[in-house]
Image (cartoon, helix red, strand yellow):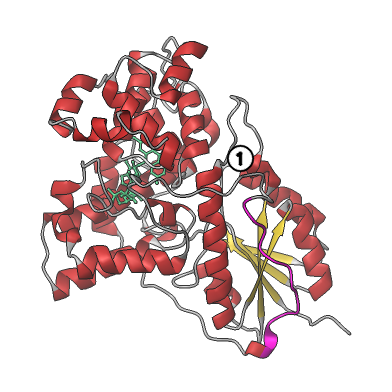
């Protein structure tokens, strides 16, 4: 039987959604059928130079759930998603040859490892196959902000005020439904957690993030946090919380792999403000989404400097590499119970609150003066919501080599007494017998 021919291929990366996906929307133009692919890149599961697995079991499971959901949602739009273990630069040319693909559409990335993959891919493709990529991970699109990357301000507030005044958030885009006859005949199953080298596991009962991966779950969460419970309306008061699902939006993990777009969240906030009420909390969630954008622009401006020990400031601190201290931090056995509770939460759930992250990072980089890149690499491994720009941007910031030139050190005990005055959070993780 002759293999079906498909003109356009969508290569999914960190944009794992059907709604408001500019890559999909571009690919859906001028074609009768679409094919999609996601490559589970073995490099993402290798051990890094500090000895951590680049992706630990939490994010691996979340990713597989996301892909299952994406496959279902795409199928309903008449689009097949192939999920294949292998390097994109090797797999995609094969798929292009098999299906006679003319153009490969994908989300543009700019950090070193992602760029290397794109370069290698373009070398391996037939000269006749075109690559077409767009930025689609922002709230404020790079073409709309009226600044070149070089002109991105060093201070967040200057950036925020500029984009709020000069730029508009784009409307969301949708795709048509293709004929189901165009679904391709490919019976490959989505790889399992075991295929990626992990054991199956249950979510910890105390997890603040008991949610599953996938666009459907992300949209359900949005609906629940905004419209069903109206928790959005108290976000600014609760956002420094430590326990449970509702002190903050918990959008980060879905945003990080692109299961939901920042624009979708923005426009849902606008709907909420119109239908319900508008207050400083409804605005504050947008404010935080602008932080997310900001770290993306910082990394666009400074390139690979965000991975260097002196960061983007070239500040020369003494950094240490004491193995014992690093292990105590990881295992939650330092001299600071508040740090320990947070590190145990991370170890057992893959999640930690923003308040917790700031404290444990400050303790690591400023109190213990340990090479902040090791802390960042550990976060990269464990976090469900790891996002290269937010992670390295925040770590640089806390370590004093990023967008906060002040050499600040958190007073951990004061932080614990302010944010966990009765010690409830610390007890939850330090006295837990379930692990
Ligand atoms: P909410 O408080 O509900 O905020 C809504 C959204 O705004 C978040 O989902 C996130 O997309 C964005 N946001 C909020 N705070 C920040 C911030 N400080 N920087 C950038 N975006 C922000 N966030 C990640 O998504 N991935 C990371 O790898 C990551 N690493 C971090 C490392 C350190 C050392 C620190 C201090 C912070 C890090 N953050 C990271 C930012 C922040 O802690 C998380 O985004 C937030 O805790 C996620 O929970 P939420 O979705 O409930 O946040």
How many residues crowd mark 1 within 10 Å: few (<14), some (14–19), many (20+)? few
The image shows residue 95, relative to residue 369, as above or below, that is: below
Q: Residue most toward the right?
A: 1
Q: Residue 400 location in percent, x, y? A: 35, 23
The quadrant holding residue 218 is: bottom left
Determine whether, in the image, residue 83 is placed left or right of residue 200: right
Q: Residue 165 location in percent, x, y? A: 23, 57
Determine whether, in the image, residue 31 is placed left or right of residue 321: right
Q: Residue 97 location in percent, x, y? A: 83, 69
The quadrant holding residue 44 is: top right
Determine if the magenta segment contains residue 113: no
Task: For mark 1, give the secondary structure.
Answer: helix
Which region shows up in magenta? 181-193
Beta carbon at label 1 within 8 Å of ligand 1: no
Determine if the magenta segment contains residue 191: yes
Determine whether, in the image, residue 292 is placed left or right of residue 128: left
The image shows residue 23, relative to residue 282, as above or below, that is: below
Examine the rendering and report whether any part of residue 235 can be seen.
yes
Q: Quadrant of the C terminus?
A: top left
Q: Quadrant of the N terminus?
A: bottom right
Please name the residue shown 66% across and 83% down the image: 33
Determine whether, in the image, residue 118 is placed left or right of residue 129: left
Q: Residue 27 location in percent, x, y? A: 60, 74
The image shows residue 201, relative to residue 348, as above or below, that is: below
Q: What residue sits right under mark 1 in the picture?
A: 112
Magenta span dominant secondary structure: loop
* Depth check, front residue: 276 or 60: 60
Tally the numbered discs.
Answer: 1
Please name the residue shown 71% across and 60% down the image: 84
The image shows residue 200, relative to residue 268, as above or below, that is: above
């Amino acid at each position: 039987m002759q293999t079906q021919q498909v003109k356009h291929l969508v290569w999914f990366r960190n944009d794992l959604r059907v709604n408001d996906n500019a890559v999909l929307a571009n690919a859906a133009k001028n074609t009768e059928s679409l094919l999609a692919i996601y490559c589970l890149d073995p490099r993402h599961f290798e051990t890094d130079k500090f000895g951590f697995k680049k992706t630990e079991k939490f994010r691996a499971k979340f990713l597989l759930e996301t892909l299952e959901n994406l496959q279902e949602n795409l199928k309903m739009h008449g689009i097949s998603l192939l999920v294949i273990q292998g390097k994109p630069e090797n797999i995609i040319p094969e798929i292009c040859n098999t299906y006679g693909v003319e153009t490969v559409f994908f989300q543009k990335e700019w950090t070193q490892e992602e760029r290397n993959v794109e370069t290698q891919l373009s070398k391996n493709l037939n000269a006749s196959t075109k690559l077409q990529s767009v930025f689609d991970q922002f709230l404020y699109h790079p073409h709309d902000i009226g600044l070149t990357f070089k002109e991105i301000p060093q201070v967040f507030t200057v950036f925020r005020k500029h984009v709020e005044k000069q730029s508009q958030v784009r409307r969301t885009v949708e795709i048509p439904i293709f004929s189901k006859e165009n679904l391709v005949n490919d019976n490959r199953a989505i790889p399992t957690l075991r295929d990626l080298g992990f054991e199956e596991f249950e979510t910890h009962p105390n997890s603040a993030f008991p949610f599953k991966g996938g666009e459907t779950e992300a949209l359900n969460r949005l609906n629940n946090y905004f419209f069903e419970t109206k928790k959005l309306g108290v976000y600014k008061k609760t956002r420094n919380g430590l326990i449970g699902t509702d002190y903050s939006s918990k959008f980060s993990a879905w945003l990080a792999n692109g299961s939901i777009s920042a624009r979708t969240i923005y426009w849902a906030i606008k709907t909420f403000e119109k239908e319900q009420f508008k207050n400083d909390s409804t605005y504050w969630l947008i404010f935080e989404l602008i932080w997310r954008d900001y770290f993306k622009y910082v990394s666009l401006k400074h390139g690979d400097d965000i991975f260097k020990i002196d960061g983007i400031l070239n500040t020369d601190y003494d950094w240490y590499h004491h193995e014992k201290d690093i292990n105590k931090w990881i295992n939650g056995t330092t001299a600071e119970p508040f740090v320990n509770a947070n590190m145990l939460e991370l170890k057992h759930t893959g999640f930690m609150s923003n308040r917790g992250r700031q404290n444990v990072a400050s303790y690591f980089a400023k109190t213990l003066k340990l090479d902040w890149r090791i802390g960042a690499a550990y976060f990269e491994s464990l976090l469900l919501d790891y996002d290269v720009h937010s992670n390295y941007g925040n770590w640089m910031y806390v370590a004093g080599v990023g967008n906060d030139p002040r050499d600040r050190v958190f007073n951990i005990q004061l932080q614990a007494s302010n944010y966990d005055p009765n010690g409830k959070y610390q007890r939850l993780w330090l006295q837990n017998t379930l692990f």
